[in-house]
Amino acid sequence: MTDIIKLTAAEVAAKIASGELTAVEVTEAHLARIEAVDEKVHAFLHIDREGALAQARAVDEKRERGEKLGPLAGVPLALKDIFTTEGVPTTVGSKILEGWIPPYDATLTKRLKAADVVILGKTNMDEFAMGSSTENSAFGPTGNPWDLTRVPGGSGGGSSAALAAYMAPLAIGTDTGGSIRQPAAVTGTVGVKPTYGAVSRYGMVAFSSSLDQGGPCARTVLDAALLHEVIAGHDPMDSTSIDEPVPPVVEAARNGSVQGMRVGVVKQFRGEGYQAGVVQRFDESVELLKELGAEIVELDCPSFDLALSAYYLIAPSECSSNLARFDGLRYGLRTGDDGTHSAEEVTSLTRAAGFGPEVKRRIMLGTYALSSGYYDAYYGSAQKVRTLIKRDFDKAFEQVDVIVSPTTPTTAFPIGERADDPMAMYLADLCTIPTNLAGNAAMSLPCGLAPEDNLPVGLQIIAPVMKDDRLYKVGAAVEAAFVEKWGHPLLEEAPSL
């Protein structure tokens, strides 16, 4: 089992296609791993054992019939519990949807199934994707496999922890302000936020519709690219979906190089609040890029300093609108419907019981920002800042091909350390938020361990809109250089497991 769970997704797919392994063997190995360690980690909210084994058997039958298998056929995957899955619970980490069984698959779920990817189950997350630590889940926090007393990032901490603990070689996350990249950084994995609109949001429970974006999570850059190619592409069911060909991400990952590329370093992405070890590893990464043939260009993007403030007006405003549908009348939890309460009272009681503190905080912030007399002062001003941030990116990309930065200012912090300090929690997304506001693509990949705590540090790569292949081209080159330099992959099984 140990040999199987340590394989990359590309290696698993190749062994299944050649007959060296069966998809059922691979799935059983990962289900056994989940059973062995997830009681400690709590990465999963639901394990679909029967469904996963049925998908695996179908792949083996295809191979026996001589049918051609796709590049990820039979590879197990952990799916963030924000995408609808027909017949399988979708809770979004919230009591308000506990026990809800969707009657349809999200477009992303359909594409995974069509590619014969084996979905093991649904992963834990901050409630409605609101958080940076997975502590806001109504079903309890997830531990970081590197140190179970620390957070695995958020909101997609369940997906990143499943990868780091070898419970799955692939995972899916969503990124509204960094929820794919920040968990990847603190768990030593790879996470990609594709260009906004590149992956369908149909069937993804909405938090902030102008920011939300699903994307691939993996342990290697190539594996992320293979998954990216499966889930991306135009979807007529999503009005924000981009009707353009998927960039050649797999080709870029197989031919990684930064020779002759201009790589930007933004001065706003360092300074007060950044952990010394994170800055050290980032500076080493910049030197490595120089050694690999890149030209480093210093950039000044002054509006990035306003990104956090703008985000925490735009995202709560949109969430207050999106979450209005959870009224206790149509689906999900219903509280107080005993014949003595009006419909309005049932809605109020249901929301009081079903939403957690962070969700309530953001709904109230957003409702206030959108209220009469405050709309222009708050939400309108935040949208103007968003335009300035996009202009700063446009200006930067006239000078460089990609931008690099630390993914997050610190390594994984202890569970509970920032639970009562929302501002400290929000600062975890300092480096990731500008990309969501502008809509361009970004990746986080491991760039070593911080010397002071021996925990993973992430390098963020940012590319222009629909130039997602540049992420993989640079990421693959950096990853290969790290492996060659230290002689082994950065991610090893955490001793605490």
Image: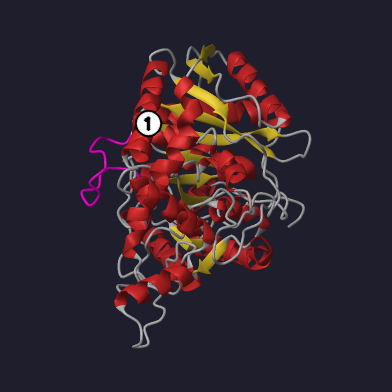
Q: In the current view of this chain or complex, which residue is farthest to the front? A: 373
Judge whether 253 appears above or below 346 on screen.
above
Provide residue 335's location: percent of width, then percent of height.
41, 78
Question: Which residues lie in the magenta part?
Answer: 231-246
Q: In the current view of this chain or complex, which residue is farthest to the left? A: 236
Provide residue 417's location: percent of width, then percent of height.
69, 50
Provide residue 12's location: percent of width, then percent of height.
53, 51
Quadrant of the rendering where the C terminus is positioned: bottom right
Q: Secondary structure at mark 1?
A: helix
Residue 342 visible, this angle: yes
Any magenta on residue 372?
no
Q: Name the residue type under label 1.
A: Arg
Any magenta on residue 241?
yes
Please state which of residues 254 and 314 is positioned toward the viewer in this rendering. Answer: 314
Quadrant of the rendering where the N terminus is positioned: bottom right
Judge whether 203 appears above or below 450 on screen.
below
Q: Main secondary structure of the magenta part?
A: loop
Residue bearing the label numbered 1: 386
* Residue at image coords 54%, 32%: 431
Q: In the current view of this chain or complex, which residue is farthest to the right? A: 452
Judge left or right: residue 474 versus residue 372: right
Judge left or right: residue 25 versus residue 232: right
Judge left or right: residue 209 versus residue 364: left
Judge whether 351 appears above or below 196 on screen.
below
